Structure formats: C-alpha cells, structure tokens
Image: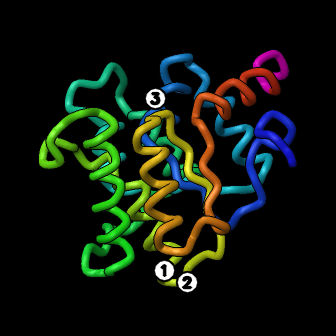
Amino acid sequence: MSTVSDILFPAVDAHVIDTNLFIEFERADAVSLLERAVTEYDIVLLYPPRVHAELTPEAIPYDVPPIDTAIEAGWVQILEDIDYSNPVVSSTMDLVRRYIAVADDRPEHEIEQADAEGGITAQLLSEGNVASVAVYTNDRAAFRGIERALSSNGYEQQVQLIPALDLFESVQRRYRFHE
C-alpha cells in the first residue's frame, strides 16, 4: 500500500478538500507548492461552497485571496451546492453531524457545517459523477464521521480519507527546496 509520502495524491476520480488544507498552505506561504503538486499530478481540488466563504473572509490581508487565484488558474474548483433532497447526502450529513456532536460533546444543533465534505462526497458518489473520492481534512471528528457515514451508505471502498497535514508535510518535503 502506498502512503501519501510515496504518492502525493491517490488514484481516485475526485479530490475533496476542507478549509484546513488550504489554510495550512496559506499560513506557511506555500500555496505555490500546493499548486505545483496539484498541476504536476494533473488533478483539480474540489470543495463545497461553504469552504469558499471560509477562505474569503471580509477582512483579508491581500487584494485577491489565494483561493480565488487558484480557481482562476483552474487547479481548484467550487462544487455546486449540496443537494439536501438526495437521501444519501442527507443521511450522510446527519450521521457526520451526530458523530461530531458525540465526539466533541456538543449539542447537535451547535455543530456548524463540518459535515459538508461528507455530504458533497456522498453526492458525487450517489449521483454517479465519480467512482472514487479522496477527502482531505484535519478535523478528526469529521474525518471519523465521514468514514462511518459513507461506510453505512455502502461507499467504504470508494472513499479514501487523508489527513490534510500528511499531504501538507509530503508536499513540503518534496517541493520546498526545488522551487
């Protein structure tokens, strides 16, 4: 079995990211390294619309947010809104939300939309848009909730969950001194 450090991106049809992946690269002033890795592997990073709002706050320290530059360059893409009427999507999101509530010991109604990556992944798979998906996040509760929810919907073989920090460190090791 390959690790993220051997092969940066698994051979899947879609790569769904959470906010924390892009923020990690942005904080380290290493978005160009992520772009290099993504374009070298000829993939596009996908994310739910909610993630875009988190990556483009009102008070930003630059004229154009790096995520918008990445979208314009074509290596990042915002997905359509989540279809909550899709029963696989809604059940996945409910299960993820419940798992996060228990893991974080919070009432379910206080959980923000940390379930969006699970929902969008369920939508991609259930609508037949892709056969396999990699999801990148550092949110451990969301990570486990997505894993369990998608397994309960029969998608355990089509989804790979990857800690975003693992990808960040692998990209840093591979490209940091080769710019």
Q: Mark 3 points at which residue?
A: 23
Q: Which of marks 1 and 3 is in front?
A: 1
Q: Which residues, given as a range, are shown in magenta?
A: 175-179
What residue do we see at 79% from left, 25% from top?
175
**Please, what is the three-letter code of the amino acid marked with disc 1?**
Ser
Which mark is first along the chain, 3 or 1?
3
The foreground one among 114 and 94 is: 94
Q: Is the magenta stretch mostly helix, strand or loop?
A: loop
In the image, residue 79 lies at what x, y percent? 42, 64
Q: How far apart are marks 1 and 3 (CA)?
A: 29 Å
What residue do we see at 70% from left, 46% from top?
38
- SS at badge 1: helix
Q: Name the residue under label 2.
A: 128
**Please, what is the three-letter code of the amino acid marked with disc 3?**
Ile
Q: Which colour scheme is used?
A: rainbow
What residue do we see at 60% from left, 49% from top?
161
What quarter of the picture does the C terminus occupy? top right
What residue do we see at 54% from left, 51% from top?
76
In the image, residue 92 lies at what x, y percent? 37, 65
Using a 10 Å C-alpha cutoff, classify the residue at mark 2 as few (fewer than 14 neighbours), some (14 to 19) or many (20 or more): few
- Residues at circles 1 and 3 in contact by the CB criterion of under 8 Å: no
- Residues at circles 3 and 2 in contact by the CB criterion of under 8 Å: no
Left or right: 128, with 169 as reference point:
left
Q: How far apart are marks 3 and 2 (CA)?
A: 30 Å
Left or right: 104, with 88 as reference point:
left
In the image, residue 134 lies at what x, y percent? 62, 55
Left or right: 99, with 171 as reference point:
left
